[in-house]
Amino acid sequence: MNYSFTLNDLLFMSQGALITFVLTISSGIIGTFIGFFIGWARSSSSKIIFYLLGIYIDIIRSVPLILQFVLFNSFMAIAGYPMDPFLSGILTLSVYISGYVAEVILAGINSVPKVTRNSSRGLGMTYLQDFIFIVIPIGFKNIFPSWTGLMLGLMKDTSLIAVMGATPPELLRSSQIIINRVHEPILILLGAGVFYYVMCYLITYLAEKYEEKNHIKSMEIR
Amino acid sequence: MLDYTFQWKVVWKRLPDLFEGAILTLELTILSSIIGLLIASILVIWQKNDNIFLRNFTKTWISIARNTPALLQIYIAYFGLGSFGIHLSSYVAVLGAIAFNNAGYMTEILRGGFSSVSKNQNQAAKGLGLNNFQTYVYVIYPQVLKTVFLPMTNQFIWAMMGTSLGIIIGLQELTGMTTFLQSQTFRPFEFYFIAALIYIFISKSILLSSGFIAKKYLRI
Amino acid sequence: MIKIKDVHKSYGDLKVLDGIDLEVNNGEVVCLVGASGSGKSTLLLCVNALEGIDKGEVLVDEISVHDKNTNQNELRKKLGIVFQQFNTFPHLTALNNVSLALKLVLKMSKKESNDLAEEHLIKVGLKEKLNHYPSELSGGQQQRLAIARALAMSPSYLLLDEITSALDPELVGEVLDTLRMLADEGMTMIVVTHEIPFAREVANRVAFFHEGKIHEIGSPKDLISNPKKIRTKEFLSKIL
C-alpha cells in the first residue's frame, strides 16, 4: 500500500470537487425553483398564505441542516421508502435552500416600488404581464447579489451530506478517504480548503463581472 | 402507507438527556459568539490600520472564514492541527472553529454598521465640542448598534446551527446527543423530530426576544 | 472677534482656499456667497477646526485655532455650527439632541440641561416636538432643532453652512425667520447662503467667493445692488 499523496489522489479530490459542483447546481436549481414560488405566493395579498409559508421558512432556518437530513432519511425509512443518501441529500439541500431563496425572492418583489407597478397596471397590463415584464426584471437585479451569496453558502453546505455516507464522495468526503490512508490530515485538509476557496472565488468573480456588466449594485447579505 | 407506530414514550424518558445536549449547544453558541464578537471588534479596527500586515491578516481571516465550509474548519481544528502536535478536544475544536467563522462574518457586519453612520455625525458631535471618546460612546456606537443588532442576531442563530456539526467529531451537543440516544433505542424519527422542535423553540425564543428588544429599546 | 489671515488649504492638487483674509466683528452678520466649490463651506470648517489649514492663521478671540497647543474642544464651545444636512442625531429625541452636549461638554446636571434644552427648543418653535425623534420631524423642523442644539451651548459665534439648501422651498421661511430673530438679538454669525434676498436684508457685509478667494466684499447694498466686478455680476445675474 502506498502511504504518500499521489497524482491519483489529486484526481480523486478533483472528482470530489466535481461532485460538489453537481450537488450545488442540482439542488441550487431545484431550490431556487421551489423558493421562487414560495416567495411569490408570500407576496400575494393573502395573510393566511403569508403566515403558513412563513412557518415553513422559519422551520427550515432554525433546524440545523444535518438534522434535517437525518430526519428526512429516517422518515423515508419508516414510511417504507428508504432512499439513496445521494438523492435524499439533493432533496434535503433543495428544500433547505428554498427557504432562504423564498425570503430573497419576497424581498426582491417588494423592492419594486408600488408606483412602478401601479403605472404598468395603469397602462392596461394584466397582473401576470406586470409580474413577468416589470417585477421580475427589476427585482432580479436587486436580489442577484444576495442570491449568489446563497448559492455560495449552499456549496459549502454540500460538505454536510458527505458525512452521511453519500456516494460518490464529494470534495470533503474524498479528502477524508485519502486522509485515512495517507495520514497527512493538515496537508490534505488545506488542499481541500484551497479547492473550496477557488470554487467560491470563481463564482464570486463571475457574479461580480456579471453585476458590473449589468450595473447591479452589490449588497452583501449572508 | 405508513404502517409504523410512533413511540414517543421513549423520547419522553430521555428528555433530560436531550436537555443536557441542548444546554451544551447553547453554551457553545454563546461562547463562540462572544469570542467571535471580541475578535471581530479588533479585526474591524485592523481592517483600516496603516500597517499592511494587519490589514492583510484581517483580509485573509475574513476570506477564509467565508469561502470554506465550517465543517472543513472544524476538521482542520480537530484533525489538521494534530499534524503540529496540537490535539484539541472536540469541544475546543468546535468552539474554536465556530468562533473563527463567527469572527469573519461579524467583522463584515460591524464594518457595515460603521459605514452606515454618516461622516457628518462625527463632524456634528465635534462641532458641539464633544471629544473623541464622547463622540464614539454617545453618538457613533448607539447608531452602529442599531444597524448591527438584527444581523448579529441572525449570526447568533447561524452559530447555533453550526454547533450541530459537533456531532461529526463526537461531541454530544443537541444533534450529537440525539444521534447517540436514537442509536440506543432504534427510534430515530421520534428523537430527531423532538430535537428539531427544541431547535425551533430556541431559535424562535431568541428571534422573538431580539425583535422585542429591537422595537422597544432600539426603535428599529 | 474672528480674524482670518491669509488662509490657504488644498485637497491634493485642488486649491480650495487661496489666501483668505476676513475679520468678523462682534455683533456682525457676514454672509458668504458664491458658486458651489468656491471654498465657502470649507472656510467655516476651518474656523471651527473641523478641518486643518495649510498656511495662514485663524484667530477666535485672539486664540489661534490651529495652534497645536490650543484645546480645540474647549474652543468649539465658543463656536456653534449648523450644517446643510442638519446632522441631527437620529438615535436621540429632540430634547436629548440638545441636552447631550450640555451634559457632556458643559457638565450640566440632567435637570439643568433638560430645562435649558427645552427653553431653546421652545424658542425655535419646537415646543410640541420635544420627545420626537428626528425621523418624525420635517426638514425645516430638523434644521431648527440643529440650530437650537448649537444655540443651547451659548456660543459667542454661530457658523451656518447653507442651512436652507436641503430644504423644500416652503420650509425655508421658518428657518430664515429663526435667523432673523438671532440677528436682531445681536448674535455674531458667518452665514454661507444662496438666499441673496436674505443676505441683503440681514447681513452687515456680504463676501463673494470665487475660486478660493474673496473676490469682492462690501455692504449688501453695494455688493448685491451695485457689484463692481464682472464675476460678481455674472454670479448674481444667474442666481437672482
Image: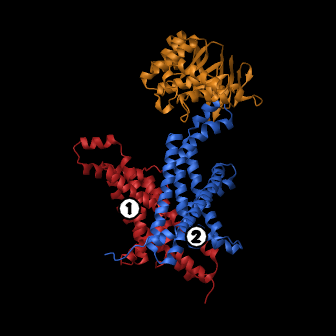
In orange, which chain? C
Label 1 is found on which chain of the structure? A
User: What is chain A's hue in the picture?
Assistant: red
| SS class, disc 1 | helix
Q: Which residue is mark 2?
A: B172
State whether residue B10 is above or below residue B121: below
In this view, the residue farthest toward the bottom is A1
Res. C100 in view: yes
Q: In the depicted view, which residue is nearer to us: A50 or B183?
A: B183
**Residue located 47% across and 24% down the image:** C140
Q: Which residue is mark 1?
A: A32
Q: Amino acid at mark 2?
A: Gln
On the rendered image, what quadrant is the N terminus of chain B found in?
Answer: bottom left
Q: In the depicted view, which residue is nearer to us: B50 or A143?
A: A143
State whether residue C160 is above or below residue B204: above
In this view, the residue farthest toward the right is C69
Residue C121 lies, in percent from the top left, at 54, 21
Label 2 is found on which chain of the structure? B
Q: Give the alpha-carbon distance from disc 2 to disc 1, as whole Å.
A: 34 Å
Res. C38 in view: no
In blue, which chain? B
Residue A198 lies, in percent from the top left, at 54, 66
